[in-house]
Amino acid sequence: MSKKIITLHVNGKDREVMIDERESLYETLRNELNLTSVKKGCEVGECGACSVLLNGRCVDSCIYLTMWAVGKDIVTVEGLRDEENDDITDVQKEFIKEAAVQCGFCTPGFILKAVEIVGHNKPYTRDEIKKLITGNLCRCTGYMNIVTAIEHAIKHNMDKLGVPYEVMPSTTSFDVPEDEKDKMLESLLAMQNNDVTKI
Ligand code: FES
Ligand code: FES
């Protein structure tokens, strides 16, 4: 087994890690850097639970060698932040508002996919959003809430860009009780702070 010390740029910081050259980025992020928002799902690139952003694009880290990520900008949910407002991002807020979280296992992957989609700066239709998220699977099947949350996050971005964008009337929207919203926020913040006792 060939071990090597490399430097990865993760969530805005350089991190030195010793890796087996054959190990996946998923294994390094989770086992060496304790970034537990990166989930182990199918391990064959089908479910998106292990998604991370690499230079702004979502990649299934279970089928991506750590060696390939050297020199790239890696972002996990722990690194998401609205720096301007010192807050969680619009995407995370909309996932809470639309109750787009059930068991939460798929949530980090969907949130990163949504961040990538919003970053395209395009006024995607609902059908286009559905196609864009086909690489992410939710075992709790909460897809409509997820799509609605992404539409609202796109709307925030389009408003900033001055582009008209209409959010389709939701067939699933309902008022989420405040205490449920608090629990979701606590869970997302725990993920952000890598507090594994609350995830
Ligand atoms: S665990 Fe990587 S795609 Fe499913
Ligand atoms: S919320 Fe449970 S897998 Fe998606």
Image: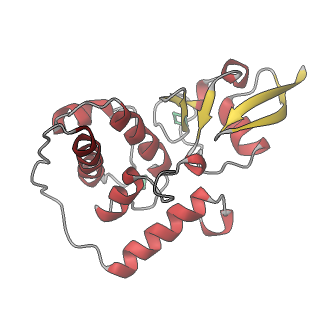
- Taking the spot 23% from the left edge, 40% from the top edge, the residue there is 158
> Which corner quadrant holds the C terminus?
bottom right
Residue 5: image quadrant is top right
* Residue 57 in picture, x, y percent from top left: 47, 27
* Lateral position of residue 77 relative to residue 89, left or right: right
x%, y% of residue 120? 34, 29
Q: Quadrant of ligand 2?
A: bottom left
Front-lying residue, 127 or 161? 161
Residue 130 coordinates in the image, percent (x, y):
25, 36
Is 160 drawn above or below residue 127 in the view shown?
below
Percent across and percent down for residue 32 are: 79, 42
| Closer to the camera in the image, 106 or 111 | 111
Residue at x 78%, y 37% (from the top left corner): 15
Q: Is residue 44 left or right of residue 98?
A: right
Colouring mode (rainbow / by chain / secondary structure / one colour): secondary structure
The answer to whether any part of residue 150 appears in the image is yes
Q: Quadrant of residue 74?
A: top right
- Image quadrant in which you'd find residue 8: top right
Would residue 62 appear left or right of 181 to someone viewing this image? right
40, 70: nearer the viewer: 70
Total label count? 0
Q: Quadrant of the N terminus?
A: top right
Please report the residue visible at 37 percent of the width from the left and 55 percent of the height from the top: 140
Camera-nearest residue between 117 and 4: 117
Looking at the image, can residue 1 be seen?
no
Q: Residue at x 27, y 43 (%)?
A: 160
Rendered position, 60 above or below 1: below
* 24 versus 107 height, above or below: above
